Image: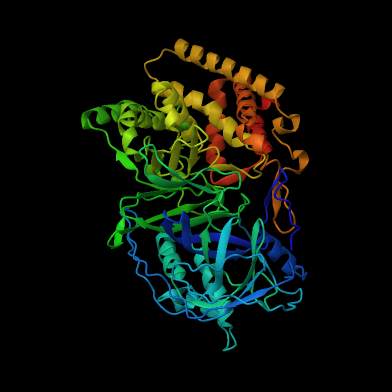
Amino acid sequence: MEKQLDPMKDDLPLMANTSYMLVKHYVLDLDVDFKGKVIEGSIVLFFETGSQYRKTSSAGKECCQSQFDETCEMKASEPCHIPMINVSTSSSEMEYNYFAISGKEEEGTSDENSNHSNHEQASGISSSKDHCDIENHGNKDFLVVLDCCDLSVLKVEEVDVTAVSGIEKFTRPAKLTGVSQKLENLRNQIVHELVTLPADRWKEQLYYFTHCSQAPGCGELLFSTGTWSLEIRKSGIQTPADFPHAIRIWYKTKPEGRSVTWTTDQSGRPCVYTIGSPINNRALFPCQEPPIALSTWQASVRTAAGFVVLMSGENSAEPVQLREGILSWYYYVSMPMPASTFTIAVGCWQEVKQQSFKQTGAIETNTEFSLPSSQTDFRWHEEICGHVEYPCRFQNPAARLQAVIPYRVFAPCCLKESCEEYLLRLIPQCLSAAYATLGTHPFSRLDVLIVPSNFSSLGMASPHIIFLSQSVLPGGSHLCGTRLCHEIAHAWFGLAIGARDWTEEWISEGFATFLEDIFWARAQQQLSHHEIKEQQELKALLRWRRLRDEVQNSEEELQVLRPKKESTGELSESGASVVKYGLKAEKIFMQVHYLKGYFLLRSLARTIGEVSYLASLRKFVVKFHGQLILSQDFLSMLLEDVPKQK
């Protein structure tokens, strides 16, 4: 077992052993209970064996081993039933309808650590009171370690993907030699074929992920929860290759869980949303948090009628009524992203729509000035993407010409008028300005939500969705526009291009702060070049004063852009690591990484010249989108582009 880390320390542990097992896809199936302030249901994880295992197994070494000290056996009093799901989507791209596969799961046993308090009855699960059997399991079983905190894990089971109709197409006949072929190996082979399907078969892949996630269980797995992790094993399985590659975890969140906040919106209606917690999403679902664990996901979320579910998803979900008073919302993504970028917001949000269609048309026409300056340098070149395979917008000719992606605005009822006055008309201007600067939008659509007043930041960007504070609305078009530009910039820097080591947050925040000025200058077409420069100089002065005050009044160790220095990006053999100072309370309120990063990039732009510098940024985006980087990746490419500055 990995060394237990003290949760009171400043560093955030990333416990997942991603070098041995890597989650490629999550399927969440959840119910939101506002009365109990919990989210409960199941999550199915589809794995691929990790790089470290492939390396060590080919060298004949033994892989990661661990030992459970105390176990507690829990037996089910009756079989569990798969919840019936019937989800459809309004997306024109998604043509499949999903139908539930019902069936009874096999009974089994679950190993638990004695520190569990997980014996509540959950939806679809009925279990007897547990009793403890102390056993010595030896030290041979392979452990899958997931990042997990503040969750009640109720049951973990293997999923029988062979029960899915039509799944036999993913079994390669050449491998099925003789009757001794193990069923377990067949299941893992099917999952391997499914997760490695080429990008042009993504709809088919999503279809089978859905049906596999609804397949019956075929045996419970042993598990134990710690402060920061969930550890799962199957008795007698000693290698990642033999460990089940599709597992289902039944769980529920806790009201005090730190990944989401339960509150009321500005109209007094209940809501819940992900708050950008320092512990990320591990108190929302068991996952692999290290940035290297890029995965896709899909989610069905059920809630009472009257609530709207917004989420990181490529489709603009429309609710499906399951029964009277209950709606289901379905979202999916096909671009692999870190699990930390998953975002959800459930509340009585109302969509803000432009009252004057004539005005909307005028804005969109004006902002279609849009061809990125010197995008002709690379637009028609068939670039080979450097990322893992997925349906990439940079390879889509129509997407490359789309200056303004489809967008929606949601807010509590009492703020709809304020949103319509400024925010709604600013979005197409800011999107078009971003496109004119960096080129192809990495994501196909955008939702913007005005979040409750307890939100501690001005904004937060996630795939396909931006949270904005109500504080930006009274500030007129300038405050609203600059914050919107900052969050839109994160689509490229922070999301499409991420930091391989989270301690290098300047890669996300420094770039977004620098680019917000560039975007906002282009969005304000009524201003002269001189007025824009004056505006930018004034903002630079204010930022410098803020940085000076922060440097004078904070610990020096928190001011370093690369606190791990030469070890930045390094992982342990298992893939586990820590985010240095990730839990330090005062760090949440610091802007040193925003400001130092901004001044570094501003200095480089002035040295190289803004035109050449922005051309290099566009080239960088084309080369590194869909990938994780370190500081040196950016600086090396910049110096290659401008060799005289080396």
Q: Position of residue 256 (x, y in %)?
A: 55, 51
- Residue 439 or residue 161, whichever sits in front: 161
Query: Who's the residue at 55% across and 74% down the image?
Result: 158
The answer to whether residue 551 is left or right of residue 84 is: right
Q: Position of residue 166 (x, y in %)?
A: 41, 75
- Residue 214 or residue 598, whichever sits in front: 214
Q: How many marks?
A: 0
- Residue 481 or residue 295, whichever sits in front: 481
The answer to whether residue 113 is left or right of residue 441 is: right
Q: Position of residue 599 (x, y in %)?
A: 63, 23
Q: Position of residue 548 (x, y in %)?
A: 67, 19
User: Which quadrant does the C terminus fall into?
Assistant: top right
Residue 441 vs 288, above or below: the answer is above
Query: Who's the residue at 41% across and 40% down the image?
Result: 400
Residue 384 vs 459, above or below: the answer is below
Query: Who's the residue at 76% across and 58% down the image?
Result: 3
Q: Can residue 374 be seen in this snapshot?
A: no
User: Which quadrant does the N terminus fall into?
Assistant: bottom right
- Picture colour scheme: rainbow
Q: Can residue 86 be seen in this snapshot?
A: yes
The answer to whether residue 154 is left or right of residue 321 is: right
Query: Who's the residue at 45% across and 65% down the image?
Result: 209
The answer to whether residue 383 is left or right of residue 111 is: left
